[in-house]
Image: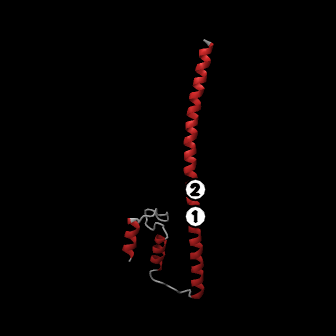
């Protein structure tokens, strides 16, 4: 009987190891997804910070040269430029990167403001 009990214990351990291995694989997949998303967000942040710094410098330059400068359509041009650079400008997904496809909400917004 002792041999059968030992065999059963080994079988149970083998089953537990298999389950742990499966859980480890799931965790590894989730970690991979998180790392990819983190990298994408870091790149997006870097790009947006550069755009913000460029905008701040442009604003400071305009303020020094002509503080009363009021250009109609400047906001529209900025939004159109952001859209062309690959970011959503619609209220549904504002600021998130577009996935190489046009967004109907963004296009509707651009056409409405023309």
Residue 83 - label: none
Name the quarter where the C terminus is drawn.
bottom left
Label 1: which residue? 45
Can you tell which mark lies on residue 38?
Answer: 2
Label 2 secondary element: helix
Horizontal arrangement in the rendering, residue 86 relative to residue 27 (left or right)? left
Is 92 or 81 nearer to us in this picture?
Answer: 81
The spot of residue 87 in percent (x, y) is: 48, 67
Q: Nearer the viewer, residue 76 or 84?
A: 84
- Where's residue 19, x and y in %? 55, 33
Q: Which residue lies at the image location 55% right of the left edge and 63% below the top edge?
A: 44
**Which residue is outermost to the top?**
1
Give the CA separation, mark 1 to mark 2: 10 Å
Quadrant in which the N terminus appears: top right
Q: Residue at x 56, y 60 (%)?
A: 41
Earlier in the chain: of badge 1 and badge 2, it is 2
Decide which of 64, 88 is in the foreground and name it. Answer: 88
Q: Position of residue 113 (x, y in %)?
A: 39, 75
């Amino acid at each position: 009987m002792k041999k059968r009990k030992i065999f059963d214990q080994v079988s149970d351990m083998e089953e537990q190891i298999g389950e742990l291995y499966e859980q480890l694989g799931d965790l590894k997949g989730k970690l991979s997804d998180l790392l990819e998303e983190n990298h994408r967000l870091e790149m997006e942040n870097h790009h947006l910070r550069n755009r913000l710094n460029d905008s701040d410098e442009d604003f400071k330059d305009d303020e020094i040269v002509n503080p009363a400068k009021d250009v109609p359509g400047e906001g529209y041009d900025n939004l159109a430029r952001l859209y062309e650079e690959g970011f959503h400008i619609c209220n549904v997904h504002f600021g998130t990167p577009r996935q190489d496809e046009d967004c109907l909400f963004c296009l509707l917004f651009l056409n409405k403001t023309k």
